[in-house]
DNA sequence: ATGACTATTTATAACGC
DNA sequence: TGCGTTATAAATAGTCA
């Protein structure tokens, strides 16, 4: 994104990819930290590098915080279940549906498409 | 960070903080997406805004992926986490396996919820 | 508050060692 | 393979519509 505008596609050259990974990972975690502090909100990020040498997973703020935060979110719908069964039923059906789609994509090994779709949901 | 260099401290002004939150959250999720695609690595981010209006947690790529990724790291023995890594193929296989287990649990939960609703209709 | 618009600060791709 | 440096691309704080 500097000297030259780059497309968001997998970097095939090992050296370049590892270098980009290291740089961007660092900045990403910094951004998560800044957002968390500036806005006083819980946030976490996890990045791993399977298949790479020296693949320490990077987790911010910590694996415990991350696990805790995500676990809480995951359990939220469950706690609402007792009070709103109809909503919950709908929720579960949707989640199962989504998981099935996800499963299909994973089996095809099409993670990029999945990532794009996920991003579109967020933007 | 533009017009004026800002310190990384909690933004007390509600309007400013919410605006900053919205802008930065969007960019952050984009960064996670880019890193994931550029380097072909699993990554996730979670951001929430408790106490704010419209505080849907933002999770990328999805809560299941995030939970999966973090759970996997948590469950890994420290030695495996530090020294070695799964190659991409084994990684994907494991992910699929885990998703299938999750799918089974969800379906079970869904059946139970459906049964509950059906029961309520009779009472 | 929602979106567009800069002036600046940051992030970073390509180099250089 | 790793670090600095530098020229660009991106992000973004403040502002106005």
Image (spheres, coloured by chain):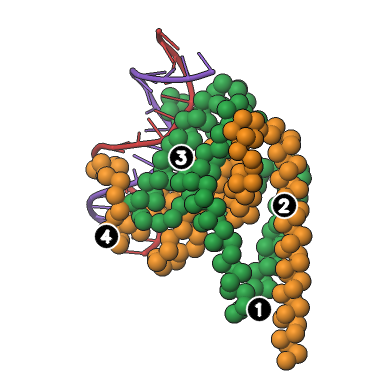
Chain colours: A green, B orange, C red, D purple
* Residue A56 screen position, x and y as percent: 56, 34
User: What chain does badge 1 belong to?
Assistant: A
Badge number at residue B13: 4
Q: Secondary structure at mark 4?
A: loop
**Quarter of the rendering occupied by the C terminus of chain B:** bottom right
Which residue has dot 3 on it? Answer: A28
**Quarter of the rendering occupied by the N terminus of chain B:** top left
Q: Is residue A54 left or right of residue A86?
A: left
Which residue has dot 1 on it? Answer: A86
* Residue B114 screen position, x and y as percent: 74, 76
Q: Residues within 10 Å of mark 2 (few under 14, many from 20)?
A: many
Closer to viewer: mark 4 or mark 2:
2
The vertical placement of A57 against B67, above or below, is above
- Do pointers 4 and 3 mark residues of a single chain? no
Q: Nearer the viewer, residue A103 or B23?
A: A103
* Distance CA(mark 1)–CA(mark 3): 39 Å
* Distance CA(mark 3)–CA(mark 2): 27 Å
Which residue has dot 2 on it? Answer: B99
């Amino acid at each position: 994104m500097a000297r030259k505008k780059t497309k968001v596609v997998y970097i095939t050259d090992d050296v370049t990819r590892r270098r980009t990974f290291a740089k961007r990972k660092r900045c990403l975690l910094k951004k998560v930290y800044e957002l968390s502090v500036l806005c006083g909100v819980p946030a976490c990020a996890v990045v791993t590098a399977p298949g790479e040498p020296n693949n320490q997973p990077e987790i911010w703020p910590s694996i415990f915080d991350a696990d805790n935060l995500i676990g809480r979110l995951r359990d939220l719908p469950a706690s609402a279940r007792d009070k709103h069964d109809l909503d919950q039923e709908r929720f579960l059906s949707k989640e199962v549906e989504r998981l099935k789609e996800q499963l299909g994509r994973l089996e095809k090994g099409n993670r990029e498409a999945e990532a794009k779709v996920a991003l579109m949901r967020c933007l």
